């Protein structure tokens, strides 16, 4: 009997400390997820159940006949803890099923109602047990709560067994599958033991102490198994917070040792004063400092080697992607790779001048956010921002991120060098190709313009002759129109082949408004013949840009003509202006069918056209001229109602002339 008493003392102590340990881990982790919150309250219920039983047992050992108020206090918390255990077991499994995506919406609501409805409906049994004036059965408290509660307890564990079977079937890897399999059989054994225990009490009056001890041991096994799985493969993503788990564990060891010191002082009180015993035991760990230092040195060496290997494993794939020469792809891969390997909620990498500063970190799911400086040769080169799943980033993860921040600049520099080399190779190939195209265009234009000019002159003379028959006059005019169209195409070829000169070399300047007005006046006849309305919006009158009138004329004439050809009859083309502090923007907008995403990718390429008679050089000429002038072209399409296209040309303003 004495052995069973001490064994019960050990089991109740373990039952109090294990769930309390997980409560501290969850409080320290502080992950913003319902599963952890419900699991916290399940551990709280277990702590109340085991802790109250432990309190009653210690009171019995210390006082012999404990005070009734103390027993009533322990009984109240024991009943409350036990009462909520089945509901919390079903609830925590429902939340984990929701995390795994097995239930959502109304099905989850139904499971939550199933979890808490019995606890509410059977509340009178709980009130009756709390008000009971009979002897309090701490060895079998469920007997006082009534048979309906015992059936609900068995059913709740049975539902937990069902969910563990579901989790095992849908586990993403072998480790989690084995964990859920062990937990499933543990719940099967626990449920079976409860059925046997409750059935035994129906036929034999009295509580079986050994049976209750076995039931409590099986109730603790899932918490022990959870510790091993967290450490083995980071189950629930708590393993990434190893320093938190170790810290809580060491605090518990220290508390247990202090408790042992106090109890040993009481045991040795007949032989030594309690203060002397406590002093001896408190200084006893000093003897183990040297062996502990040796063990810690070996562990630290192993940890350092492990972290170096881990960091090399992280940087290897990053360097491989860097050799592809795509900085954007490298940044995306680095963020995803670091996030996956270090079990972080989110990772963001930004290098100065190599990223979009408008990107923001998603903080909707909470979690600690740490920012690490990325430096190159002691100079700031950017930052790495990491968000943990819980309240803090673990020490080993922190060190790994610091090491990565030392390696990332080299990877990005390598990527930039390769990217610049590839870009130069592409530009050289493009320039060689365009040089051949330009030579060909100049040769074709030169060889065709003179014959076309002669033919046009002869036909114009014939058109002026009164003797030309009326039947031939219409056909002759048609030939003249085609010659004019062909001349326009040849002019485009000449524009494309003719190299431009940057305005900074010549100091050119012009009034962009007057150039736009003159271009609109020239092209209004083309617009009228096509049934298109060409409108000039309100303009500032004078807006001088750092470009020659010829270059601006090339740009605007191609854009306006492109808009006229894009819209059908009764269409509209509008020219608008906006003069800012440093640049002037001219917008050419039409209400045509707009551009598809595939067209937007190719529309600026030379010789790409969607028109039956187009050359595909208009926008290419615009792009080339803007590059020469230091301007830029922006395309918005569709503009409204899935129709329309807006080309916005931005040109730098000319420097103000000094006043004499």
Image (tube, rainbow, N blue to C red):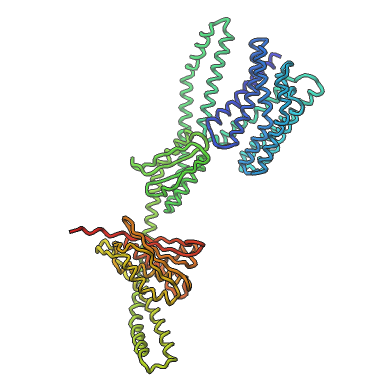
Report the number of numbered marks. 0
Q: Residue at x 50, y 14 (%)?
A: 282
Q: Nearer the viewer, residue 304 or 525?
A: 525
Quadrant (top left, top right, bottom left, bottom right) of the N terminus: top right
Q: Quadrant of residue 614?
A: bottom left
Residue 639 image offset from top left, x and y in percent: 47, 61
> Quick check: 470 left or right of 24?
left
| Residue 520, above or below 159 | below
| Residue 158 visible in rendering | yes
Residue 382 image offset from top left, x and y in percent: 38, 44
Q: Nearer the viewer, residue 185 or 446?
A: 446
Residue 75 image offset from top left, x and y in percent: 67, 19
| Residue 153, above or below 444 | above
Residue 436 image offset from top left, x and y in percent: 36, 71
Q: Residue at x 33, y 78 (%)?
A: 446
| Residue 211 visible in rendering | no
> Quick check: 67 left or right of 148?
left
Q: Residue at x 40, y 67 (%)?
A: 619
Q: Nearer the viewer, residue 653 or 500?
A: 653
Q: Residue at x 31, y 62 (%)?
A: 629
Quadrant (top left, top right, bottom left, bottom right) of the C terminus: bottom left
């Amino acid at each position: 009997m004495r052995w069973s008493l001490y064994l019960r003392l050990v089991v109740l102590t373990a039952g109090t400390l294990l769930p309390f340990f997980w409560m501290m881990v969850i409080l320290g982790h502080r992950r913003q997820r319902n599963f952890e919150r419900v699991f916290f309250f399940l551990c709280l219920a277990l702590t109340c159940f085991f802790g109250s039983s432990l309190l009653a047992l210690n009171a019995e050992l210390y006082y012999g006949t404990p005070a009734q108020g103390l027993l009533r206090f322990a009984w109240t918390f024991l009943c409350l803890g036990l009462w909520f255990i089945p509901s919390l077991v079903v609830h925590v499994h429902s939340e984990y099923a929701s995390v795994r995506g097995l239930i959502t919406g109304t099905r989850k609501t139904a499971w939550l109602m199933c979890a808490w409805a019995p606890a509410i409906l059977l509340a009178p049994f709980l009130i009756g047990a709390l008000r009971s004036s009979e002897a309090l059965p701490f060895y079998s408290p469920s007997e006082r709560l009534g048979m309906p509660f015992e059936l609900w307890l068995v059913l709740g564990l049975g539902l937990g067994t069902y969910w563990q079977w579901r989790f095992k079937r849908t586990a993403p890897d072998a480790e989690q599958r084995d964990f859920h399999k062990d937990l499933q059989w543990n719940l099967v054994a626990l449920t079976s033991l409860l059925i046997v225990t409750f059935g035994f009490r129906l036929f034999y009056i009295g509580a079986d102490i050994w049976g209750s001890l076995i039931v409590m041991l099986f109730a603790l096994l899932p918490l022990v198994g959870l510790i091993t799985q967290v450490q083995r493969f980071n189950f629930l993503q708590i393993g990434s917070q190893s320093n938190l788990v170790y810290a809580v564990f060491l605090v518990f060891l220290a508390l247990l040792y202090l408790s042992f010191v106090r109890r040993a002082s009481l045991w040795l009180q007949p032989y030594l004063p309690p203060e002397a015993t406590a002093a001896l035991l408190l200084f006893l760990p000093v003897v183990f400092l040297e062996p502990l230092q040796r063990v810690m040195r070996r562990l630290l060496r192993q940890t350092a080697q492990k972290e170096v290997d881990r960091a090399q494993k992280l940087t290897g794939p990053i360097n491989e992607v860097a050799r592809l020469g795509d900085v954007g792809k490298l940044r995306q891969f680095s963020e995803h790779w670091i996030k996956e390997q270090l079990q972080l909620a989110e990772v963001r990498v930004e290098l100065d001048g190599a990223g979009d500063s408008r990107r923001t970190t998603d903080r909707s799911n909470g979690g600690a956010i740490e920012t690490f400086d990325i430096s190159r040769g002691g100079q700031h080169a950017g930052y790495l921002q990491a968000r943990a799943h819980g309240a803090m980033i673990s020490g080993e993860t922190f060190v790994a991120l610091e090491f990565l921040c030392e390696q990332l600049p080299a990877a990005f520099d390598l990527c930039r060098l390769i990217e610049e080399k590839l870009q130069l190779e592409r530009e050289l190939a493009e320039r060689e190709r365009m040089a051949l195209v330009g030579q060909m265009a100049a040769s074709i234009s030169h060889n065709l313009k003179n014959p076309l000019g002669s033919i046009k002159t002869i036909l114009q003379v014939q058109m002026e002759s009164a003797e030309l028959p009326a039947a031939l006059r219409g056909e002759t005019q048609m030939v003249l129109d085609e010659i004019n169209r062909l001349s326009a195409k040849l002019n485009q070829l000449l524009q494309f082949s003719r190299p431009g000169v940057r305005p900074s070399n010549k100091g050119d300047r012009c009034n962009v408004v007057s150039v736009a007005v003159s271009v609109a006046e020239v092209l209004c006849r083309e617009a009228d013949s096509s049934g298109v309305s060409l409108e000039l919006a309100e303009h500032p009158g004078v807006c001088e840009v750092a470009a020659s009138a010829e270059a601006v004329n090339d740009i605007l004439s191609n854009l306006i003509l492109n808009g006229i050809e894009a819209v059908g009859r009764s269409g509209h083309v509008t020219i608008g202006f906006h003069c800012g502090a440093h640049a002037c923007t001219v917008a050419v907008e039409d209400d045509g069918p707009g551009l598809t995403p595939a067209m937007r990718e190719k529309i600026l390429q030379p010789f790409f056209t969607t028109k039956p008679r187009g050359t595909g050089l208009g926008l290419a000429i615009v792009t080339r001229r803007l590059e020469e002038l230091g301007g830029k072209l922006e395309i918005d399409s569709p503009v409204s109602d899935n129709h329309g296209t807006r080309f916005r040309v931005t040109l730098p303003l000319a420097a103000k002339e000094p006043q004499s």
